[in-house]
Image: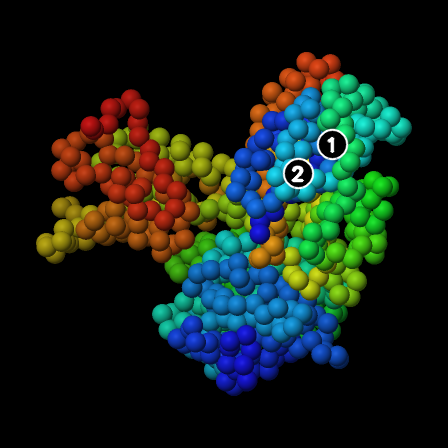
Amino acid sequence: MQLDGFTLQELAHTGGMARLWVVTHPDHEKPLLMKVPMIGEGDDPAAIVSFEMEQMILPRLSGPHVPQFIANGDFATHPYIVMERLPGKSLYPMLDLLPLPLEQVTDIGVKIATALDALHRQHVVHLDLKPSNIIFRETGEAVLVDFGLARHNLLPDLMEEEFRLPYGTAPYMAPEQILRIRSDYRSDIFALGCLLYFFATGTRPFGDPQRLKGLKKRLWSDPVPPRALNGDIPPAFQEVVLRALEVNPNRRYPTAAQMAAALKDLSQVPLTPRATKTKRDPFSERLRRRFNPEPIEPPKRQEQPGELSNAPIVMVAIDLSDSSADLKDLLRLTTQRIVEKTPDARVACVNILKINRLALDTTLDETGHNKHVLRLVDLKSWAEKLNMPEGAVTFHVLEAVNPADAILDYARQNYVDHIVMGARAASAMRSLLGSVSGEVAAHAPCTVTVVRNRAIPAAE
Amino acid sequence: MRIALFSDIHANREAFEACLNAAAGVDRIVILGDIVGYGADPGWCADKAAEIAAAGGIVIRGNHDQAACDTHCDMNSSAKIAIEWTRNQLSAEQKAFLGQLPMSVMDDDRLYVHADGSAPAKWNYVTDASDAEGHFNGTSARVSFCGHIHVPALYGLAAGGRINRFVPNSEVPIPLLAQRRWLGVMGAVGQPRDGHPTAAFAIYDTDKRELTYRRAAYDIETAQAKIRAAGLPEGLAARLARGH
């Protein structure tokens, strides 16, 4: 069968709201996927609106974490969406293998959080994150599919006024979504928390309620801590999952990037009482929440640009050896100014331990002290005066031959929004080696602030 | 085809020029009425609108344009003072141009009108979904564009009859899905009232069916100084800086 130049090959999937066909087109080498909504009589009216939303949103998304958009069919004649066909399978078949080993769960979690971060930066909340909507590319990236319930925060939300009941998938739906708030990026963080809980324990944190009453239970009834179900789960993982599952979005990770960073390095996750909880909250506490709930407000619309800018990851590259005390103070002052207006910021203090390419470096210095430990102590002492809330600052000593490359790699891999670093003062070293800050500024994936002490003239 | 949509210029030459510059390169210009009134440059703005009309643009009549040629009108006091002053500024030729403007124009599947299109001569504001419903019931165009209220909004009518209201919050192009009916309410070029002092206009791409709400920064101080120099009410100058 032919449709607007596409040849329909086979029916790949029949879902609740649409059918998926494998199609080919002479302009495209690889097979594509065509989504055709079910809009006959007796079909769910939501199918139409959700299909319209997807026709609006998918063409506006780009990058490796979404299927590439190919074409929209005219709604009046043949409504369809054609997109890239992803070769891999979704996470859905994995449900038979749960619980998965922790390394696998955190790896999946990092990849999904990274994909969510990319989506949120394009102003879209997915609102239906679940295993069947996540596919992995051969290159490893998670791809989020099905934007039928999604919300683009800069476009009209056609779903908003259409239905009385909340739409979503019961086991993964965030509390605010049940209250019909559809604009909060952190709803996806909650869904990811549900997924990680499920994958690590084999149990869904809130079951699979079929009615609104059961769905609403998660507004006051907290899940059994994952460590009570699987003793192999470390406290830091429980901390991350339970933070993602907080009822009030303000207490969750402020961004998917911050959650990805936490999952990537569980050793740096600050532990709160969440980490060591062994039981659900007392019955009286749950009862109190049920009848006296904390209000959940829709997120405040922020002026452009970027609603996510309130929770940046700031990387401060501190050169402990070369910098004068003045420059270190100035670096701290600049960092304070950057995070002042952003209470949810995270600061990563990074020091590069330069190693020689040829010599086999010893990790001990002349007097036998561990260099790493000494550097960490110095970093912590530098950061103390930042007066950041506990857990908002992390410390990293990286070994590298080329400091600029190490800083850039770290920034790329850890979702850094802003690099702050000092400029090397005039020295023979600098004229020989060139400027690290100059190289970082030239190649960084984000904003870079180079701090220079005006009292000391810089090199040429 | 890319169409620039300007509404409620209100004799603000600086804002009008800034929008014309920002929209340079479009295939057609449509002015949705209220070329004069409130501001200090009615003559220049009327001439510019006439020039645009002569070059193939579409110019619609607004209530202020009508009042500038017709002494029987009902307006609030500062608008009335401004319109009386405006009448004295306009040449007979300019008044004749404003006086012959159409109340609405159909252009392919698009309707251009100053206020609620179901009864254009009543100059009803479209402030909410129920006003938009009146417009949709009384007109048949797939896509309508109006102004009058000085606050931008976009109304979409689904097959089931529900109306979705959206307040544009960026310059991201908004797809006007073909299966729905749409009413794009423009912000004002010359006297914005949505809290943003920059001049509001929009671009509609008929091939992509995408509407982009845009803003243009303009020399507000000069526009204010001219209003004050003309002896018009101070409030008309002051509000430009606040955008409401």
At x 65%, y 72%, the residue is A77
Where residue B29 sits, quadrant-wise, is: top right
Res. B55 image quadrant: top right
Q: With B101 as the anchor, is A363 left or right in this view?
A: left
Q: Is residue B129 above or below residue A44?
A: above
- Mark 1 crowdedness (10 Å alpha carbons): few <14, some 14-19, many ≥20: some
Write down the chain letter for disc 1: B
Location of residue B143 with respect to B63 vertically, above or below: below
Q: Residue at x 67, y 72 (%)?
A: A47
- Please name the residue that numbered disc 1 is placed on: B97
Residue A179 appears at what percent x and percent y? 71, 60
Task: Tell me which label, 1 or 2, sits earlier in the chain.
Answer: 2
- Residue for point 86% across, 41% down: B122
The chain to which mark 2 is attached is B
Q: Secondary structure at mark 2?
A: helix
Which numbered circle lies on residue B53? Answer: 2
